[in-house]
Amino acid sequence: MRWARAAAGGLTVTALLLAGCTGDGGSAQRPSETGPMTFVTGGDLTDYLRNVLSEWNRTHPAEKVKVIELPEAADEVRAQMATGLRSGSGRFDVLNIDVTWTSEFAAAGWISPLDAERFPLDDFLPPVVDTATFQGELYAVPYVTNAGLLYYRKDLLQREGRQPPRTWRELESEAKSIAPKYGLHGYAGQYLPYEGLTVNIAEVIQSAGGQVLSDEGTRVTVDSPAAREGLDFLARGVRDGWIPRDALTFKEEESRRAFQNGDLLFLRNWPYVYDLANEKGSEIAGKVGAIPLPGPNGQGSSVLGGSNLAVNAGSRHQKSANELIAYLTSERVQRQVLTQGSLPPVRAALYSDPALVRRFPYLPTLKQSVLTAKPRPKSPRYEQVSLAVQAVAHDALAGRQTSDAAVARLARELQAIVRRG
């Protein structure tokens, strides 16, 4: 599956590196800093990327881009990027980083601040721009976005005369009362201890009005009634059985297959699921609906996934890198991101384009989800923050710890991480 999906989301987010010649470690942007680049990507995006970059290469013969693939796993991509950046090497010019890495890379001095006036940020969906900033300064440009959706079996809800759930109470009620009548489990997300679990936990906490960390990651705010309410919603589902215990082993694809095979009434997942669930040969083709995630009292809030384009502070090709970023975030290329890459673009106008909406009917719903979505906790030590959330949350969902005890434990662990940072 595409690396960009899970970063979404998750998670498998696209990581691009543009590698150039060995640099001098300087970060000043000078007009003469141009030259050929190597485009390194995680995952299997090369078919769509090669098409996009072939036009760049035709029109920029002195700045040609060569595509190189990195491993598909986001953690491995990050590790390989960090190794080169930590050494101060100028080999990497532009990096397409998971949105959660922007703060870490900026705090470490690995990526250059960007001129916000150079890029049409007003044309982007507003929440995605926040993922590209650190301490009020632009350090990247949004390239691909993502937000979670609630998928449901519209055929079964229609048969029962019920509407898609708009609140957690309605979701729980329908999962308990309708799913068993058709031999289905009620609801699932991604609850294996990995980045996807961090996303799911952050979503229920923020949907209830809470936060894991303060906006810039300097304070721990997770010890709150909202966090306990959100965690208990999922833990109660596993305990009472309307969330199958198998979901504790689910990542994106395991949960997508369970839904697509007709085993689930409701599923939380990323937009890529819509096309796969409705494609020819799918057991539930034409029977799938999608709405924004519900919350305690109405629409909830998704975590904002996706990837951002940043410039290596040690690159010798700063001018070329900036121009390539402008190209990749232009409206024409962003249209290709959607139509050829099946990835959610960051340009707001594309979500109301009639031709695109006919082809991708979920776009208005996805736009609504993105506009109410929030980034994952911003922290220079995000990886450690995420690991703590995963470990504690999985214990709570598995019934090894109460929600109250889990939230208190998580607050203690995050306090230690923030102090070290």
Image (spheres, grey):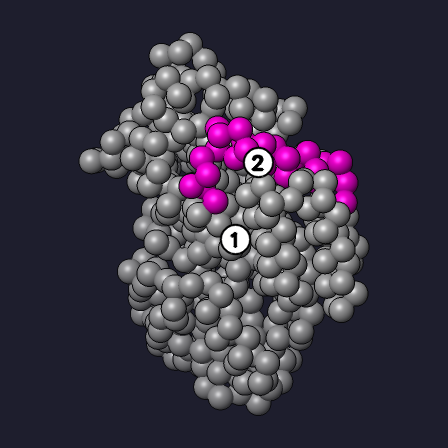
Question: Pointer 2 and pointer 1: residues touching (CB < 8 Å)?
Answer: no
Where residue 391 appears, x then y in whole percent?
Answer: 59, 54
Q: Which corner quadrant of the image does residue 107 belong to?
A: bottom right
| Amino acid on which disc 1 is placed | Pro
Residue 205 can be seen, yes or no: no
Give me the residue at 37% from left, 55% from top.
2
Indicate which disc residue 330 carries: none
Q: Is residue 339 left or right of residue 34?
A: left
* Vertical arrangement, residue 61 with respect to residue 211, above or below: below
Residue nearest the viewer, comparing 118 with 275: 275
| Amino acid on which disc 2 is placed | Leu
Give the residue number, with chain letter if any, for mark 1: 193
Residue 89 can be seen, yes or no: yes
- Quarter the N terminus occupies: bottom left
* Magenta span: 223-248
Give the residue number, with chain letter if any, for mark 2: 234
Where residue 289 appears, x then y in whole percent?
Answer: 40, 27
| Helix, strand or loop: magenta stretch | helix
Judged from this view, the residue extending furthest toward the top is 161
* Vertical arrangement, residue 182 with respect to residue 304, above or below: above
Would you call the spot at circle 1 few (<14 residues within 10 Å), some (14-19), or many (20 or more)? Answer: many
Where residue 385 appears, x then y in whole percent?
Answer: 65, 59
Give me the residue at 34% from left, 60% from top.
45
Q: Mark 2: which secondary structure?
A: helix
Q: Mark 1: which secondary structure?
A: loop
Disc 2 from disc 1: Cα separation: 14 Å
